[in-house]
Amino acid sequence: MAGTRRDGTVRGSDLAEVLRDAGLYALVTLGLCIPIVSYRTDLSQTSALDLTPRWGLVAGLCAAIFCVRVAQRLILMRRDARRALTPSPRQATEAVDATPNAGQRIPSLALPLFLGAAVALPLVAALASGGLGPARYWIDLGILILTYVMLGWGLNIVVGLAGLLDLGYVAFYAVGAYTYALLATTFGLSFWLCLPLAGLAAGLWGILLGFPVLRLRGDYLAIVTLAFGEIIRLVLINWVDLTGGSAGISSIPRATFFGIPFTAGPNGFAATFGLSFDAMHRNVFLYYLILALALVTNGVTLRLRRLPIGRAWEALREDEIACRSLGINTTTTKLTAFALGAMFGGFAGSFFAVRQGFISPESFNFLESAIILAIVVLGGMGSQIGVAIAAVAMVGGPELLRNLGFLKAVFGEGFDPNEYRLLLFGLAMVAMMVWRPRGLISVRMPSVALKERRAVSGALVREGHG
Amino acid sequence: MTGLTGPREAVLSVEHLSMRFGGLLAVDDLSFEVFRGDITALIGPNGAGKTTVFNCITGFYKPTEGRLTLAHADGARHLLERLPNHAVNRRARVARTFQNIRLFSGMTVLENLLVAQHAPLMRASGFTVLGLLGLGGYRAAERAAIERARLWLERIGLTARADDPAGDLPYGAQRRLEIARAMCTEPVLLCLDEPAAGLNPRESAELTELLRRIRDDGTSVLLIEHDMSVVMEISDHVVVLDYGVKIADGTPGAVRADPRVVAAYLGVEDEEVEAVEAEVGLVLPNAEAGA
Amino acid sequence: MDVFVQQLINGLTLGAIYGLIAIGYTMVFGIIGMVNFAHGDVFMVSTFIALIGFLILTTWLGIASVPLALIVVLLVTMPLTALWGWAIERVAYRPLRGSFRLAPLISAIGVSIFLSNFVQVAQGARNKPTPPMLNGGFTLFERDGYAVTLSYKQCLIMAVTVILLAGFWYLVQRTAFGRAQRACEQDRRMAALLGIDVDRTISLTFVLGAALAAVAGVLYLLYYGVVSFSDGFVPGVKAFTAAVLGGIGSLPGAVLGGLIIGLIETFWSAYFSIEYKDVAAFSILAIVLIFMPSGILGRAEVEKV
């Protein structure tokens, strides 16, 4: 790397170069800020737009970008200097190096540790915060994260294993939620009866939507699935008679403990089991319900991977043409992936409905699909544990923003860190692709071995073309 | 005139095959037969339409015209041009390899061979349902499949690398693995698209040995090849294409002596003809081949 | 009949705007084979740049002549939006070149989410109306009290579109950049070997795409008079549909596709239901991708075995 010496020290001329480069970044930032940041438009009393100049903010942004770039360059210089001993010149046209390092392998203890943490969470949270009531935040967050873990695992079948890029996965989540909501509110069916029905309905929709798109590959498949997802959402909004339109469906029957309601009455859960009533019982139950659903998803997926269908999915991801030459019916193979992925989405959807008690089309917009897909990709496509870690990071991470209230002291009272949630989410998606395009865990474990099961480097695993 | 002896039964009959891409007639009214128990070579200069013929036979292209009949030893006949792509392998039992190797490079060598046994394993797993519940004879079926894979690994000398990713193998081993993978589908006819391309002489010799063994075990072989030494050494029957038209059909010796073949391959300047003739060991009394 | 002619005019106007955006999709897809998912949001950013530019010119600098203000705004919005296009390519796509295939698409989705939320944070979530500009128009004919009009806005939109497209066509067909661009479309590696600066060509493609989206943005602002941070997604999808319908990779196809989509949208709204307008757009997208993925003017792809 030009401008660095092998011992990793930075020369004066290098520093000047770094400053010039960072200056350029700041200049571009300035250009980007004009006029989107530099003038704010607000509706005035006369409903015309007023302009408020904000050059101070622009200067702050430019300075921040300048500092970040300087820091980044200096860190990179050190790293490049270290790597200069074993240079690997790569051009922009070459593949990105994706050789797994130690951090991308999973220590054998991680799995039981993860599972243990998930099982013990309500108890630990209750002990740590002194009772179930105060632990509510943590348990609810756990439910939220586990819902995304389940969705991620469901989508992982389609995207990670079969290599079919689905940008409309949330549609099946919606089908599951609406199936439960409609069945429960119109026919009064119980959750446990509706759960499989919702899964079946979503799976059926998976086949229905999957069938026409089987010939498509890559970006086109992604866009068509996106279109389907949006169509379903728009139909949910506009078909007011059935779905209640944008207002959604409310007063969906809540979950019961296999028929015993979580109420304070004599037939309630607490009374039946001789406990004192606590509204949190329901949440704890929901937590273990989604944990169980997620684990079932995981178990089924892991099993499927070792069956011929799972191997066919992975082969399909690697090379569809070779699959056909080996007598594999790619149509049915893709459809089973679509249907199974959709089915798990449907299960998660009906869980969502029973937990919320209220659903509306707003919960099923494109952004949800993007989040689920980001979880799968960040996890490392096909890796189950990677997906779980990514779900914790992607869903739990933004929650940290809520605790940044102290920033108000810096940026003034009007500052709400929550506003920046999605902005940072978008940035994180880009950063993640640039930093680790193959995800956190990019190695692949073979489904079968003659002697010894050895991880396959992610660099060899193809990501599918469809 | 072919000089072949004994009763010959065709395993594959190609009749009046034509394939048109837009304005280009890649294959023009081609007819030939592949006999059971033979190694048949399909040769011709670059762009002669060999791979197109292959893609028609193996179901990747639907021919514009023509009939492709595959006959099993039990008398069952399959019209390949009417079968969906994957059924050409599953039902008609035609397997193939590709010019640019198409292994599942992120899967292990063993997994590659198991994917090839998809259909029987799928049945054994009760189309996934029984397998998912752990019922039925799936475990035994998988053990049998691994046994078959192990057998082929021994034949191609890759037993030690069974658990390595296929993409990590050297080129020659990848070619052999692709053949083994095709053979794991238990084909009646094995179609090889330039199996010797990029192999060194030793690997070529091993390949020849492997193909003979496959033939002797009862699978007919159809191959496209540029390496004339391989073709002349192992083929029982050679079909020559040029610009999508068949120009010769017969034993290697007969084809080699056919002036039209020489013209198609070498039909340029006399000096070049001689140079290449020397290379392929073809000695003709006169220079009539150049005409 | 009168309604029909009126809708035809409206549809062509709308189609011109979609066509301008669609060119950005089609060029980027042509050269690096990715769906630049964030392009719709770049368009949305440009509408805001144009809006603020208008306000500065009319309220602060007191320029009363709308055509003059419009020209100035156009000249300012194009480079500023182009800078966005350049920066996005540089930060979010270039490091991923040659990476696994889904990476750029996912990165683009990230950029799209970032841009709409960036504008929301910077400018607030409410719709931003502008005072009506360039009112009036020509009445083409009148019958039974229904007047078919061609407004000044519509004239302007079509005129600007035609002029810019002509200039753009010249750029792509006749200049060294255009040659380099088409060479990169055919074979990037070979183009690089022949001494074409591929990175620069790709950068320029993004810059041009964004600049044309900026033109669309200015015209969109002029036509609708209101913008919002969420205005990127749906017009983006429609323009992408236009690009695919016309045959992705084909410039005339993008414009043709834009016009068709614009016409379908206005006729659908006029004769069927306005609620299902966007359902129609997404359905057309799905139908086109499934049944005619190579579009009207595109080349059909033969599967390589």
Image (cartoon, coloured by chain):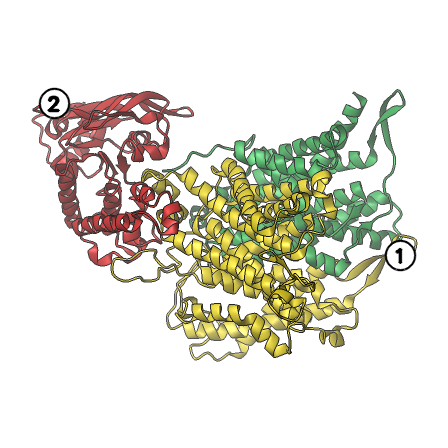
Chain colours: A yellow, B red, C green
Tag 1: amino acid: Ser
Tag 2: amino acid: Thr
Residue C129 location, x and y as percent? 83, 49
Question: Residue A36: which numbered mark, if any?
Answer: none
- The quarter in which the C terminus of chain B is drawn is top left
Indicate left or right for C90 with A8 as reference: right
Residue C137 location, x and y as percent? 86, 32
Q: Find residue A6 and report its image quarter.
A: bottom left
- The residue indicated by pointer 2 is B2
Chain under disc 2: B
Instruction: Determine crowd level at label 2: few under 14, some 14-19, many 20+ residues with C-alpha closer than 10 A.
Output: few
Relative depth, front residue between C50 and A355: A355
- The residue indicated by pointer 1 is A44
Q: Find residue A460 and report its image quarter.
A: bottom left
How many numbered marks, from 0 up?
Answer: 2
Relative depth, front residue between A403 and A87: A403
Chain under disc 1: A
Instruction: Determine crowd level at label 1: few under 14, some 14-19, many 20+ residues with C-alpha closer than 10 A.
Output: few
Residue A366 location, x and y as percent? 63, 49
Indicate left or right for C197 with C231 as reference: left
Q: Is residue C111 above or below residue A398?
A: above
Residue sitting at 39 percent across and 51 percent down?
Answer: B133
Q: Are marks 1 and 2 on the same chain?
A: no
Q: Is residue A168 visible?
A: no
Q: Is residue A50 above or below residue B65?
A: below
